[in-house]
Amino acid sequence: MSPHAQDTVPTGTNNWWKEATVYQVYPASFYDSNGDGWGDIPGVVEKVPYLHSLGIDVVWLSPMYDSPMHDMGYDVSNYEKVLPAYGTVKDVEDLVEACHQRGMKLILDLVVNHSSDEHAWFKESRSSKDNEKRDWYFWRPPRYDEAGNRMPPSNYRGYFAGSTWTWDETTQEYYLHLYAKEQPDLNWDNRATREAIYNSAVRFWLDKGVDGFRVDTVNKYSKHTDFPDAPITDPKSDIQPAIQMWCNGPRIHEFLREMYDESFAPYGDVMTVGELANTPNPKNVLEYVGASAKELSMVFHLDIGHIGMGPSLEEKYIFHPWKLTKMKSIVEKWQSFIEGTDGWTTAFCENHDNGRSVSRFGSDAPEFREISAKMLALMMVTMTGTLFIYQGQEIGMINAPRDWSIDEYKDIEGLGYYREAERRSASGDDPKRKERIMDGLRILARDHSRLPMQWDGSEHAGFTTGKPWMRAHDLSKEINVKKQENDPCSVLSFWKDVLRLRKKYRDLFIHGAFEVLDYENQETFCFVKSRDDRQALVVLNFTAASQPFTQAEKTVGKSLLVSNYDSSCLETLGPFEGRVYV
Ligand code: TEU
């Protein structure tokens, strides 16, 4: 590698966060240090050396704020307090310290599209129509149909299977919530609300030394506040998909620029990664992540997570078989769009809102579990952008067993879909919906990624000595950190090796230009990463059968850098084989 590889980087300033490997910790399920069945912040502190040995640069801690936990902490009742089961503000300061001591950084999850209905701001807002904080949330009077029945102000379907409007008896008005009724949307149009958000949720934590934020639902802060009805696309339902009413709204860039100027920039090169839904056009994405836009460092494009999901909110948890060309077109789009611009991108295939990648994109059959986890690792470490790994991905954790009943599922979103399906099946409106949704949840539910982290083969996977809030995987004796740590052939050891290679070949893997070679092929995914006169060739077999290596002639002049097979023949790719040539 050229010693000056970084000088040749074409994508603008090489900020510290561009080459970072980020590890997402879901605090409830990571490590329980006090035996109460819930993971906690001291538990994360204890595992910092483990993350450091893996090669992690940044820890992203999912919400740890005080919360009634209707949506696992994405319903914050006090931004300046920590959920008692997780610890204290002081514990978070200790975690900052533990990360910084090892040259690592810590980012938090900034959840400010909505608060909890138990937040003091909402309690005041709902108390009376003339309360000074009334306008901090969206309150609207009812409508009435011809028969005089009360109806919500608009026909929107929210994310968690129900209307976005809930009636409040006290003041006889509806309030808006894109998610659960316990998550009322904050009114960003009000300057005083924005100022309170910046102070309480952003500056409070930057003052404590955190290095940035993952910014939840980042493009939903500006709504079309006249709330017109959405077009009827689901005639059987009285609620309709209405995402265009709140994604990329009229004032969104004004708000994000203001937050940048007033809350991030004064603290230096703060890392911000926004969660950007429903922004299909790369040109519009650059409006958020171009360095000159001064809004966000980077965003997640959620398309990979949506593979296999239905096309609309109504169909979301009905599994739709997919083809490899789908994956390729998504990867190509979000790998290439920054080339020649001042924007930056991200690479990830797992988070707390999705099933496990091995179960979805590889195979969790015992004979293919490890090999396909390694193949997916090769895909991820060779991708341009900041890399995000989700806890347990590094040991190849898989979805919950298929025979677990709905009682093991805890997530508000999945359960909302399931209960709606039960009603619709029982009423005869859609008799098979319940089974189709349950089938979808087995692959796609958010619960799969929320099972306890598998540390060892002891009871509850070594996650807790108490009763875990969510059941540990039946296979935790087979898939766990302890078993893999000293095995040079394990998935964990493989991740450690390839994360090092990612840094060594940073000009190609982190900054390279991306090109797909075999777009039409539904079995293999071959792509090239290049910069100046240097090239890497990545070859991945996404099937459980051997496949011809159609791009073999492209290896001329290159040598094999890494593979998940010990040996193989050039022209044939074994099941889930992955190779990287440079
Ligand atoms: O998710 C945002 C979001 O819009 C969801 O639709 C997400 O893509 C979906 O749940 C995937 O199944 C964020 C958080 O990541 C999620 O955990 C929260 O529930 C949500 O915001 C509300 O805060």
Image: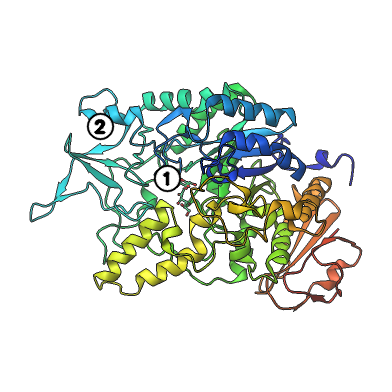
- Identify the residue shown where x is 71% and y is 59%: 379
x then y, percent, for residue 42:
60, 33
The amino acid type, in three-letter code, at marker 2 is Arg
x then y, percent, for residue 241:
35, 57
**Front position in the image: 493 or 295:** 493
Secondary element under disc 1, as helix, strand or loop, is loop
Q: Earlier in the sequence, mark 1 or mark 2?
A: 1
Looking at the rendered structure, which numbered label has been put on residue 71? Answer: 1
- Identify the residue shown where x is 61% and y is 61%: 398
Secondary element under disc 2, as helix, strand or loop, is helix
The label nearer to you, 1 versus 2, is 1
Seen as rendered, the residue at the extreme left is: 147
Q: Is residue 382 visible?
A: no
Q: Is mark 1 within 8 Å of ligand 1?
A: yes
x then y, percent, for residue 114:
39, 38
When asked about the image quadrant of residue 298, the answer is top right
Left or right: residue 306 versus residue 540 is left
The amino acid type, in three-letter code, at marker 1 is Asp
Looking at the rendered structure, which numbered label has been put on residue 126? Answer: 2
- Identify the residue shown where x is 42% and y is 57%: 414
Q: Is mark 2 within 8 Å of ligand 1?
A: no
Left or right: residue 507 versus residue 159 is right
**Front position in the image: 371 or 286:** 371
Q: Is residue 503 visible?
A: yes
- Identify the residue shown where x is 65% and y is 34%: 45
Instruction: Say above or below: 83 vs 450.
Output: above
**Front position in the image: 14 or 539:** 539
How far is mark 1 from mark 2, CA to CA?
21 Å
Give the number of callouts.
Answer: 2
